[in-house]
Image (cartoon, grey):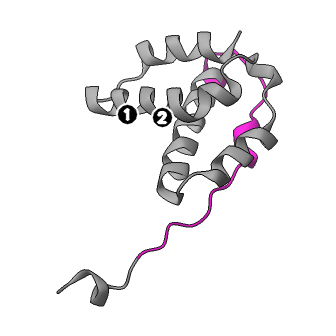
Amino acid sequence: MLVNEWVQTVWKILQVRPKTLHDYKRLFRRHLEPVIGHLNLNDVDSAPLQQKLLTLPPQTARHTLMLAETIWREALSYGITNSNPISRLRTTPIQVLPKKFLTR
């Protein structure tokens, strides 16, 4: 099954708030679909995904990775795939500013 096809099913089975679903769809369309949307779930390689994540700002990369993890978690639980290229992916750490920089 193609990633694009599976994602259409995932949108229907995820039990998340409407805004969260909207954000997931936007992240997928912008960052994941161009890289893996046309591939079969079992043919997705972690290298192109990792390269894409490294081009994104840290927080966007983290949210995109969380979405990819959700997509593959559901695919694994429904028996759609038996591989998980997402488990090897990492993002750059999100820097947290010390409180002295946050107050005026």
At label 1, counting other C-alpha atoms closer than 10 Å, the crowd grade (few under 14, some 14-19, many 20 or more) is some
Q: Residue furthest bottom?
A: 100
Instruction: Assess whether residue 90 is covered by the magenta stretch.
Output: yes
Q: Is residue 98 above or below residue 76?
A: below
Residue 69 image offset from top left, x and y in percent: 59, 38
Q: Residue at x 69, y 30 (%)?
A: 35
Q: Is residue 16 left or right of residue 42?
A: left
Tag 2 secondary structure: helix
Q: In this view, does 9 lie above or below 58?
A: above
At label 2, counting other C-alpha atoms closer than 10 Å, the crowd grade (few under 14, some 14-19, many 20 or more) is some
**Quadrant of the image occupied by residue 102:** bottom left
Q: Residue at x 80, y 21 (%)?
A: 42
Q: Distance between the residues labelled 2 and 1?
A: 6 Å
| Residue at the disc numbered 2 | 27
Residue 2's label in the rendered image is none
Q: Is residue 69 above or below residue 51?
A: above
Instruction: Assess whether residue 85 is covered by the magenta stretch.
Output: yes
| Residue at the disc numbered 1 | 23
User: Which segment is the magenta one?
Assistant: 76-96
Q: Is residue 104 left or right of residue 99?
A: left
How would you classify the magenta stretch by its main secondary structure? loop
Q: Disc 2, disc 1: CB below 8 Å?
A: yes
Q: Residue at x 43, y 30 (%)?
A: 26
